[in-house]
Each structure stands twice: as structure tokens, then as C-alpha cells.
Image (spheres, grey):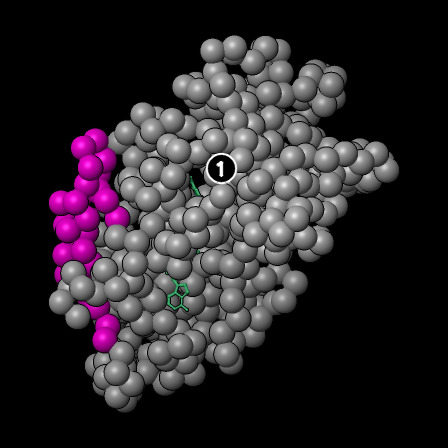
Amino acid sequence: MRHFVVVGSGPAGFYTAEALGKAYGEAARIDILDRYPVPYGLIRFGVAPDHQSLKAVSKRYDKVAESAGVDFIGNVCIGRDVSAGELLELYDAVILAIGAPHDRKLGIPGEDLPGVIGSAAFVGWYNGHPDFADLGPPLGGTHAAVIGNGNVALDVARILSKTAHEFEGSDIVGHALEALDNSAIKTITILGRRGPHQIAMTPKELGELGHLDATSPVVEAKDFPPLEADDALEPGQRKSVTILREFAARAPDPAKPKHMVFDFFAKPLSIDGDGKVERIVVERTELDETGAARGTGERYEVPASLVVSCIGYSTPPVEGVAYDERGGKFLNDSGKITDRLYAVGWARRGPTGTIGTNRPDGYEVADRIASEMPPGSSGDRGGAKGLKLLLESRGVMPTDYDDWRKIEETEVGRARPGSPREKFVRHEEWLETLGR
Ligand SMILES: Cc1cc2nc3c(=O)[nH]c(=O)nc-3n(C[C@H](O)[C@H](O)[C@H](O)COP(=O)(O)OP(=O)(O)OC[C@H]3O[C@@H](n4cnc5c(N)ncnc54)[C@H](O)[C@@H]3O)c2cc1C
């Protein structure tokens, strides 16, 4: 019998466990560890609450967790409760799937002013992440700015734009719904350093902006290259750019009080304000011959009492594990970090790709493990038994899949009408539900 441990229960962790299960059948036991008693990583804490159909992918992960050779072990944090070295002593292979939960810094003056928030924190706040329950983003001003030109920036801008009615059917947490319903924000400016051809926004997410109840997208026709230039774009990107062109051709709907303004060729230089954010100083850019943004020297100010930066994430280093500082992920060669130690998902590749991208990624690493380690005996490695003894000696109380089910049932039972669940937003609430 082989013993494997996958650390992290997001998409990458689950696809890897699924693939290991297929590769080894009854010849392996697979433990999926997570720092929280609730699984699924960014499916729960990242993917937008008004995109419920995407969150349904967790049903597939449920099947993996319920399969015979797999156990979910929650409430255990690598680096705090157990080290990578200790897991390597207990298991044949350790697969790190801890994602990239830290916001990348903007690296400009003023980014630490109150009211400047990273997207991990802001998104975590409206999705019930326990670390951000008390974030209290300032929503009392009329202007907000979102920095970045990817889908996370779009999620944040859309959530700031929607009416309470538009959150029906979502699992946005009650505290965020109430705060957003009372928000005074009327203008949300999305700042991108380059132009419409360089966005990393997908057509479905952009298309939604044309159907918001109270918000008009505002795009400037002058920001586009000539129409023929779109022919060179890959089809998905061309679709996105076409949607932006349609927005540019439309006047804002006078019946809609809010505006989502796409400010292209805009590089934030600094964030200013008296004790809290009041404005962003921006430099107009143009594309140089390599396609990079080059400052033109023209400066202007964008008012904002809330700034959300959506410029990417990094994986935190784990003691004893090789780390790529520049890439903000574990140093690895096609998923292999060192003998018997692997990385998958965002911890392997960095924060790019969709949920589905993590599937081939996890399968590739599982295949590699299977080819390097044929079915056989773990020798005296203790697997889950040994881990539980170690955790017990440290006073750490792991949770299991049945505990998660209990939390989920309680959340579903607390749901407001029209919502699939009302999530708990604090770690203690999870543990109280379990009688701990
Ligand atoms: C805001 C946002 C919105 C997104 N929306 C979409 C979308 O609409 N569609 C789409 O296809 N993709 C979307 N994505 C991308 C998608 O979420 C990722 O591709 C995917 O979640 C990455 O999977 P992962 O398993 O590598 O990381 P994660 O999902 O982050 O999972 C990591 C897991 O590791 C656990 N963990 C972290 N540290 C430790 C530790 N020290 N010890 C133990 N466990 C730990 C975490 O609790 C978590 O469960 C979105 C991403 C973000 C940030």
C-alpha cells in the first residue's frame, strides 16, 4: 500500500487526488489536507458568488472525497501544524496544492493607505473567507477604482455594480450583501496599463456587463486600433474585443445611475490621500514596439475612496521547500520539486488559467508519480495514522469530510430565501458547529 498526501483541497488538489486514485486503485490511500475544515479552495472563496454554475464543479470533487481510498483532513496547516519534512517521513509522496493566496503588491507609494485593498482580501470578504470577515471596505464614497485588466478585476467591478436584487440566487455572504446594498459608489474605474487588445478578460464575463440593472459600461472608441487589427487576434480574444467595441459604440443608459469606466493605457504612479485613499495619480501610456506599456509623461488623477488591486497572487514559501521568488511559486520542474515532493495548480504554475486548467496539470503530476513509484509497500511510513498521532501530540484537532458535510448542511439551513446557503464567516463558527 502506498500513502500519498495532497496538501490543499482546491481544484488542483482534487484533480490530483482523482488521478492518483485512478492510477493506483486500491493500492494507495490518499489524504487531502486543508488548513480549513471546508474544502474546495477558491471555488468557495474566490469564484464570484453570482457565478453559481461554476461553483457546481465541487460536486465532482465530492465524488473524489467520497471514494474509498480518499480522506479529507481539514483544519491542518502545513508550515504551522506540520512541516513538509514531517509529511515526507509519513508519506510516499507529498503534493503541494496550496494555491496562491497572497496578493501581489503594486509597488507604488500610498498602497498601504486605508481603503487600498488587494483582491484576495476583497473577494474573500464577499465570499466568507474567515481572514477577511472584518475587512469593512469603505463604500461610502461615490468613486471606486479597480486596478488590473483580468477577470478578477471584472468580478470585483461587477460585484460593486450590482443591486441587491441581482444577487438573488447567489451565495454572497449577508454582511457583504448588506454593505453593498448601502454603498454610495456610482463610478467604478477599471485601470489597465495597456489597451483593449491586451486585456485578459473573457467574453462571457465581459458580456454580462451589458445586462446590469443599474450600471452602464463606458468604453472610449479612441482606445481601439483600426478594426482590421482584430483579425490577428485569437478567436476568444477577438470576441472580447468585439464586446468592448459594442460598449464603445453605445451611449451610457440614462436610466442607469452607475458607470463602469474602462480607463485603458493608464498606469498608476501613486495613491494619495489624507490618512486614507482619495485618488490615484495615473500616467497615460502607449504601446512600445515590443507591445509593453511606455509612459507618455501625461498625468491625471482618478478619484477613489476605495481602490482594489487585482494584479495577481503569489504562493507563500513553506519552510524547507525550494521557492521561486520571482515567480511567487514553488521552484519545480514540470511539477517536481525534489525527490517525492511535488507541486500542482497555482502553487506549481503561478496564478493563471481557469479551474479546468488544473485538471491536466494534476493528471500530469499524478502520472509522473505513478511512473516513478510503482504500486508497492510504503515500508514503515505511517500515512494518516502517523499524521493523526503527530497532530494529537501538538493539540491540533483535524476535521473530516463528515464534519464538512455537517457545516454545509448548517449553512444551507441558514440560507436566506433565494440563496443556496449562508456561509459562516469565522473559523470559530465552523468549530462550534462541530461541537469543538
Ligand atoms: C477571484 C477569483 C475568481 C476566479 N474565478 C474563476 C472563474 O470564474 N472561473 C474559473 O475557471 N476560474 C476562476 N478562478 C481561478 C481558479 O479559482 C483557480 O484556477 C483555481 O482555484 C486554482 O486551484 P488551486 O487548487 O491551485 O488553488 P486554490 O483553489 O487556491 O486551493 C488551494 C487550497 O490550499 C489550501 N491551503 C492554502 N495554504 C495552505 C496551507 N498552508 N496548509 C494547508 N492548506 C492550505 C487552501 O485553503 C485551499 O483550499 C478565479 C480565481 C480567483 C482568485
* Location of residue 261 with respect to 85 vertically, above or below: above
Q: Position of residue 273 (x, y in %)?
A: 66, 46
Q: Residue at x 69, y 17 (%)?
A: 221
Q: Amino acid under label 1?
A: Gly
Q: Position of residue 398 (x, y in %)?
A: 24, 72
- Asked if 16 appears above or below 242 in the picture, the reply is below
Q: Give the range drawn in magenta.
A: 397-423
**In this image, 402 relative to 274: left or right?**
left
> How many numbered circles does the render carry?
1
Label 1: which secondary element: loop
Which of the 4 quarters of the picture holds residue 237? Answer: top right
Q: Residue at x 68, y 25 (%)?
A: 232
Q: Position of residue 405 (x, y in %)?
A: 16, 55
Q: Mark 1 points at which residue?
A: 140
Residue 65 picture quarter: bottom left
Q: x%, y% of residue 130?
A: 35, 58
Residue 126 position (above or below residue 192)? below
